[in-house]
Amino acid sequence: MGNSPQILEEPKETINNNNQRKLTLLPLIFLIHFQVSGGPFGEELAVKATGPFFAILGFLIFPFIWSIPQALLTAELATTFPGNGGYIIWASHAFGPFWGFLMGSWKFSSGVIINASYPIVCIDYLKLLFPVFTSGLPRFLAVSSATFILSFLNYTSLTIFSYASVALGTISLMPFLVMATASIPKIKPHRWMNLGQPGMKRDWNLYFNTLFWNLNYWDNVSTLAGEVEQPQKTFPKALLSAGILTCLAYVISLMSTTGSLELNQERWDDGFLAEAAGMIAGEWLKIWIEIGVVVSAIGVFEAQLSTSSFQLLGMAETGFLPRCFLWRSKWFDTPWVGILVSTLMTYGVSFMGFTNIISVANFLYGLGMLLEFSSFIWLRWKYPLLKRPFQVPMGIIGSIVMCLVSTGILIYVMAIVNEVVYVVSASLTLVGVVGYFFMSFCKSKRWLEFNNVEDEDERREQGSGSLSSGWVG
């Protein structure tokens, strides 16, 4: 990307890394849980699309062919390159800085777009109790207020480094445990085999997008690797624990509701789990689920916003973005520039429509994952002796097969979207390409201040004989 300017004095709002609070195991488990899921909210559409049998089957099988490979890949690469750049660093080391920047562009765009869906889901559940939020000005104000209030909470770091994420996760999952217990006497196993109501056409597009949306984003936590205490030990444990917690929440809630209620497939929209809780145990549990949704939306939004803002910080650390993205709040140690940029972009797409939001976010994320799988295989092939604190327990052939299965799922999900998704995704990809060359031009002209990482990388490689955490120019 050209020669970097001399590193100037640290901005006053940038805090030394040694003084930063670090993420420990338990908060990290729940942070990953919120980045991927936050609870079983949103799984309803899988039942509406295909009926109980395929919905349950999907949430049982999809974790093994998609979620677990993605988590294993993340554990290996995040512990090998424990920097805030995450997947950007991986792609840069594998294929060069252009691809690293493009990876960052795809994943960041996907993250800020998908984050717009969580206030919408929250309001969709609340409108069951408060119909005023269904449409019009009240809905606009509710979505806007939720977005900016939650962004301020992220700025204060309340939900990032502390045990607040653990509390949010516990509160959001407890009512589903109660619902599952209350449903046991009412469950009739033959209902799980229901293939859907007669006359209702199966919507495989909606089905796979729902599975993809609910069981995705395991690698997002890699952009926080620089904030994790002992990442080489903590990451694998946290990913395994979060995976078990997340998948059990989906399957248990799905089996308890579909097994204890007569199927009315048309009602299985976002928010139906609260209605189901009311049918199973009473109005009190419905209200508790509503509260759980609000709590979950807070946790999911905060986790995704943290991912996006720390990704921008990581891109600044590795010289892709100007140094202003390194600035942290002197009060809360959070990357306030990244939070501000991410919030404004999220709010900008908040009223695009729920289905389009999910489809565009999934497509962009899919592009990034294709590059991520390629980076994983190429780094295995190119640097077989590279020290890997955690390594996926299979050789190069097994790793290729694992990635090919996941790649097949990606290609299918990306092929069934509509033309609008292709146009929006192509436009954002073009923005990423232009952004790379524009940043290179600004760096060569010294119009903006960038971190100078090339010399440091070269010294580290000469001294250790291994790759460093920065990108190689």
Image (cartoon, helix red, strand yellow):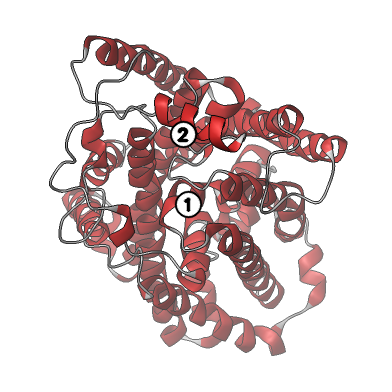
Q: Residue at x 34, y 38 (%)?
A: 312
* Three-letter residue code for mark 2: Gly
Q: Which residue shows up at 82% across the image and 72% down it? A: 190
> Which label number is shown at residue 423?
none
Q: Position of residue 243 (x, y in %)?
A: 64, 62
Gap in Å between the C-alphas at discs 1 and 2? 13 Å
Q: Residues within 10 Å of mark 2 (few under 14, many from 20)?
A: many
User: Residue 438 location in percent, x, y?
Assistant: 31, 13
Q: Is residue 1 above or below residue 258?
A: above
Q: Quadrant of the N terminus?
A: top left
Instruction: Give the residue type at disc 1.
Output: Ala
Q: Which residue is mark 2?
A: 470
Query: In front: 76, or 195?
Result: 76
Of label 1 and label 2, which has the lower sequence position? 1
Question: How far across and down, in percent of the image, does residue 58 sit?
Answer: 73, 53
Pointers 1 and 2 in contact (C-beta within 8 Å) = no
Identify the residue shown where x is 21% and y is 50%.
Answer: 144
- Residue named by callout 1: 225
Q: Quadrant of residue 308?
A: top left
